[in-house]
Image: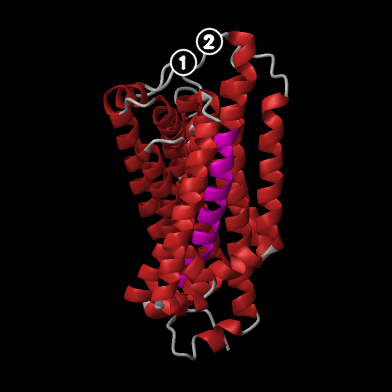
Amino acid sequence: MPSAMFTAVCIGLVALQVLAALPWWVAIDLRTRQLLRDIKTWGIGIGVCLAAGFGAAYYLDANSNPATLSGWGRLYMSVLQLQLGADLIVLILFVMLLVWPKGGAVAQAAFREGLRQPMFWMLAFFASLLMLVSPFLPYFTFGEDLKMVKDLCYAFTMMSSLLFGVVSAAISVHEEIEGRTAVTVMSKPISRRQFFLGKFAGILLSALAMTILVGWLLIWVIVLKQAFDAPSTSNERIADPPWVAEFLQYAFDQDTLADLVRGLGLWTDDALAVLPGLIQGFCQVMVLVALATALATRLPMVVNLTFCLAIYFLGNLAPIMAEATRKEYPLIHFIAEVLQTITPGLELFDVSPAVTRDVALPVAAYSLYTLNVVGYAVTYSAAALVFGLILFEDRDLA
């Protein structure tokens, strides 16, 4: 028989999932708004939460193995994370439509178009497949396989969003301009600035959706790899993060509830650990999508993608060339410094040094560095968008 506290917590957790589902569900099906105005709907929802909470409490109490309860807690938080990610995108679109109606409408249309593209789901599928296979591959790294898996999974997450965002910007913006769709859209009236920035925002939001989706799987792959390696490295359970252990020690006396909350805390700790790396990877996506959107106002898709690929390689190679030619090749060093100034500093978005460390970086210092990277990405993206607006203003659309 579950305790009253455990039952109340289960009911609250079920209610939290239902509340988290409401924003994205309303965005998908507008008829939900009418249902939410009916008091009977809320009564049914409360009844469902109570029934599901009581059922979950009895089931978990009957299966009160600590590992099982922690697993259910992790699964619960993983589902909640997906829902909160969807809510974040819905909130961004809502705010854009509220403060910037015309540009927000273009962004919403571009976002929906991005999610409907088969390329979105194809890239997400292949990135997910590669990530799921990676924990089982031999890397011959003498006990450092987990670092290798993390590095690869971060790369798959970034590259899938990057490819989708750049290709979508190169195709969508240029085709609407060449196909005269932009003329129709801007006769609403919508200015060129609203159309251009709205397309960029919508494509970037669809790339954010892919980052959230694939990044969620990244956490599960890391957890899977840790569990896969545990029998060969240690017979003891992996130690809980200090803040989780302290919270459980001082806040809970009941073993069953403590084990469930432990799972919630473990997933939260895992998600917070990968969050800075995902933010840095998405900043790189933002910069290159801004460049692709700017170039799409003048260049066809193939030329645009070629330029973006060249910028990507030069952005990574220019700092290395500048350092290697500092003393012996002054002319090449000068050219490398010019390229380093013009092209984005993509080495700032590289999370490999942080992932492959034996000791985790201090949270405050790593968070501050991530904020600096975000500031750099926003500044460079804004400059690229201004350049794109200049190119777009003189473009003949008739």
Classify 10 Å Cα crowding around label 2: few (below 14), some (14-19), many (20 and above): few
Q: Is residue 213 magenta?
A: yes
Identified by mark 2, the residue type is: Glu
Mark positioned earlier in the residue sequence (2 or 1) = 2
Q: Position of residue 268 (x, y in %)?
A: 42, 36
What secondary structure is the magenta-colored segment mainly? helix
Residue at mark 2 to residue at mark 1: CA–CA distance: 20 Å
The circle on residue 211 is none
> Is residue 318 positioned above or below 104 on the image?
above
Image point 39% across, 75% down: which residue? Answer: 39
Which range of residues does the magenta coloring cover?
198-220
Secondary structure under the numbered disc 2 in the rendered image: loop
In the displayed structure, does residue 238 sit left or right of residue 180? left
Q: Which residue is mark 2?
A: 236
User: Closest to the observer: 31 or 273?
Assistant: 31
Q: Which residue is mark 1?
A: 358
In the displayed structure, does residue 256 sit left or right of residue 213? left
Secondary structure under the numbered disc 1 in the rendered image: loop
User: Closest to the observer: 336 or 264?
Assistant: 264
Identified by mark 1, the residue type is: Asp
Q: Position of residue 54 (x, y in %)?
A: 47, 47
User: Closest to the observer: 343 or 355?
Assistant: 355
